[in-house]
Image (cartoon, rainbow, N blue to C red):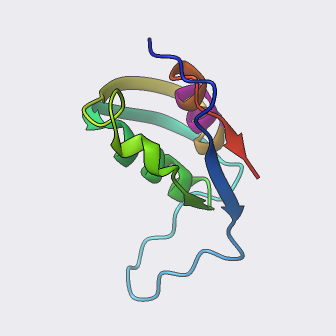
Amino acid sequence: MMRCKSLILGVVMALAWASPGTGAAPPAKNDVIPLIEMENVPLTDAIRQLARQARLNIVLDPRLSEAPFARVTISVRWQGVTAREALVALLDNYGLVLVE
């Protein structure tokens, strides 16, 4: 597990989820998702996906594209959590912080 206390993930709350034409709406902001599973997913992609499902617009700290984070991939499995809970757990595991 890597720790980098000075790295911050900036977040701006999404005003609305708008994806016309996709036909599939994301889970509601606080919906429990039965299963979240990722295997060998780049850390930044996992953060973006969980943030999208949590209805958050995010700004990643540019240092996430540098070592030691640049090549980090994750494999996780969560059951019965919200996307936000999963996101916070993922960030905490790598010493990252969610700032609103």
Reply above or below: 46 against 100: above
Q: Is residue 41 left or right of residue 11?
A: left
Q: Is residue 77 left or right of residue 84?
A: left
- x, y (%) of residue 64? 42, 42
Residue 62 is situated, as x and y percent measured from the top left of the image, at 45, 51
84 vs 93: above or below: below
Magenta residues (range): 85-90
- Residue 46 visible in the picture: no
Residue drawn at (66%, 35%), measured in percent from left and top?
Answer: 97
Q: How many marks?
A: 0
Query: What type of secondary structure mainly makes up the magenta span?
Result: helix
To which quarter of the image does residue 24 belong?
bottom left
Q: Nearer the viewer, residue 51 or 100?
A: 100
Is 86 covered by the magenta stretch?
A: yes
Residue 65 is covered by the magenta coloring: no
Across and down, in percent, residue 90 comes to 52, 29
Looking at the image, the residue that sits furthest to the bottom is 21
